[in-house]
Structure formats: C-alpha cells, structure tokens
Amino acid sequence: MARPSNEFVLAWSSLTTADTDPGWQAIALPSAGPLQLRAGRRSPENAEAVLVGFPSARLAAADKLPEGQGFSVERADPDGDGWLWLALTRKPAGRPELFESMACDVIGALDDSVAAGSNEGKLLRIFVGRVAAWQEFMRKGAQTLSPEAEIGLFGELSVLRSILESGVAPLTALEAWVGPIDGLQDFTLGTGAIEVKATLSTTGFPARIGSLEQLDDSTRQPLFVAGVRLLQSETGASLPSLVEDLRKILHGDAESTRIVGERLLAAGYYAMHANNYIRRFTVLETRLIPVEGAFPRLTHP
C-alpha cells in the first residue's frame, strides 16, 4: 500500500530553500523496518528527494542504478555513517505530481515487504526493482495506454489468468510474465515461451510482430502464439476490473502481489489512469498455436 503523500509533501514544502552550496537537507520519516527514510531536497537544484538508508546491504561497484526521464537514483552520504544511502530525486523536467506518486508507491512497496518479513538485502532489491518499473513506465511516456496497447495488455492478462487457473504457482506465473520488462516474448516458462496477440477483428487475425527474433524457435522450444480474440461488449470486463480480479487471485501472497504491481507499471498501467479505461471486453476465443514447421513468419537467413 502506498505511503500517504502528505508525509512527503509537508516535508518538501518545509525544506524549500535557495541555498547555493551543494548538499542535502532532510527530515526523517517513519522507518521501513531496518531502513531509515528521509524526505529531502538537494541543493543547489532545490530538487525533491527521498533518501533510503540501508545499514548493511551493499551494491556492487558495477551495479547500475535506474534513471528515468523524470527522476534519478544516486548514492548519497548525508551523515558519513558508512550506510548505503540511495536518493531518489526528481529531475527539473519531472512532473512534481508524478514524482510524488512514485515516491509514495516505492516506499509503500518497502513497507509491504517489511510486513512480509523481507530481510535488508531483499529490501534493497525491491527498492531497485520498483524504481526500475517506474523507469520503464516513464520510458513509455507515462501516459494513458493507447487503445491498441489497452487491448494488448488485456490479452496478456487474460492469458496470465488462464495460466494461474491451470494450477501454475502464482510466483512462477508472475515471474514468467516478462513482456513488460522487455522480454523477447510475453511469457517464458521453462525452456518454452508464449507470445500473446489480441484482436477485436471479427475476420482474420491481424497481428504485429515486434522483431524477427520474436517468433524464432531456435532459442526457445516449444514456442507458442496465443491468439486472443476479444469482443467489445457491455457485459464484458474492463482492463481495471481484470486487474482487480488478478489481485483477488493473488490476495495474501505478498511477493506475487508485489511483482504483478511492478509488471503492470512497467507495462504502462498506472492505477491513477484506471478511470480512462472504460471499454469492456469478452474473450471469445483463445488459441494456442505452436510456432513450428510451416508457421508463417520471417526468419534470419
């Protein structure tokens, strides 16, 4: 659950400064388990930031921290205490209200993971992973999904629900959903993969292929295309209602709930945009077609 935004807004407003000397000003926030949290501003940019202190966890020197169009993550040393401090900071071009939502979401993910018993090392991975999901969301424009992208995500979530209903363990199913994090196919299960294509077309099945490699079965076998034919109807499910159905299936599984939240965000689904997705769809047919032999596709010579 996201942290209340007033924790950050009040702190940032009280720290507004015209200081021209480089440095940090920060106010302590309620901690997240072993982690220390502060809302701060970095001068001279006067940029809003959230500082997270890890007492013993460490990043490797080669580890690359996420950086998006509206934010950066950097190492900080506000106290010289030997802790690993990471500062999530708004860039000048970043939208303040979006950065506020990001801060609430990222710290809320840490709170949820603390409640689930995560140790400090895992909390560090969760922090970086959640910020990386926001990085992908902002890379895709931080806007409402296009009508085509809405249909595509609905198709992927329909297949995900089918995988869960078939008895695959939730964590296995969620970790297999790699499309939102730039996976070559939408799902990778064992040595195989599934590429999902969804359409509203009533005749034929038009599908856009992202690359030659997407339907290349030389690296993953078996490889399937899941064709999901949808009908727009008043009695169908909207994208937000399908998301809610999945959350209900995962209820009580903190790790799977966290991962589905990150995948949805990376896919471009932002909860604050949910009211914009008013179309309702019924799944008319889902066909699982093996990519082999004479399957129509382009391949490398």
Image: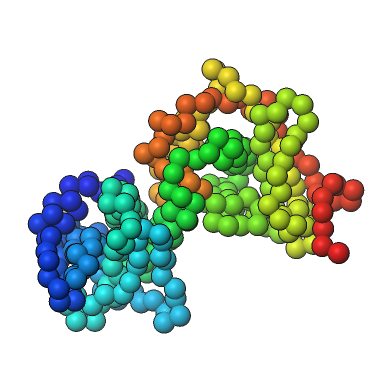
Up-down relation of residue 44 to residue 130 (above or below):
below
Residue 247 in sight here: yes
Residue 167 in sight here: no
In the rendered image, which quarter contains the C terminus?
Answer: bottom right
Q: Position of residue 262 (x, y in %)?
A: 45, 51
* Picture residue at 33% right of the left edge, 56% below the top: 94
In the rendered image, which quarter contains the N terminus?
Answer: top left
* Picture residue at 58% right of the left edge, 26% below the top: 281
Residue projecting furthest to the top = 234
Q: Position of residue 141 (x, y in %)?
A: 46, 50
The scheme the figure's colours follow is rainbow
* Picture residue at 12% right of the left edge, 70% below the top: 19
Determine which quarter of the picture holds residue 201. Answer: top right
Work out whether residue 72 or residue 120 is closer to the camera in this orientation and state it: 72
* Picture residue at 63% right of the left edge, 50% below the top: 186
Viewed as shown, does residue 232 lie left or right of 145?
A: right
Q: Position of residue 270 (x, y in %)?
A: 42, 43
Residue projecting furthest to the right = 294
Viewed as shown, does residue 65 lie left or right of 97?
A: right
Viewed as shown, does residue 31 lie left or right of 225?
A: left
Q: Position of residue 57 (x, y in %)?
A: 33, 74
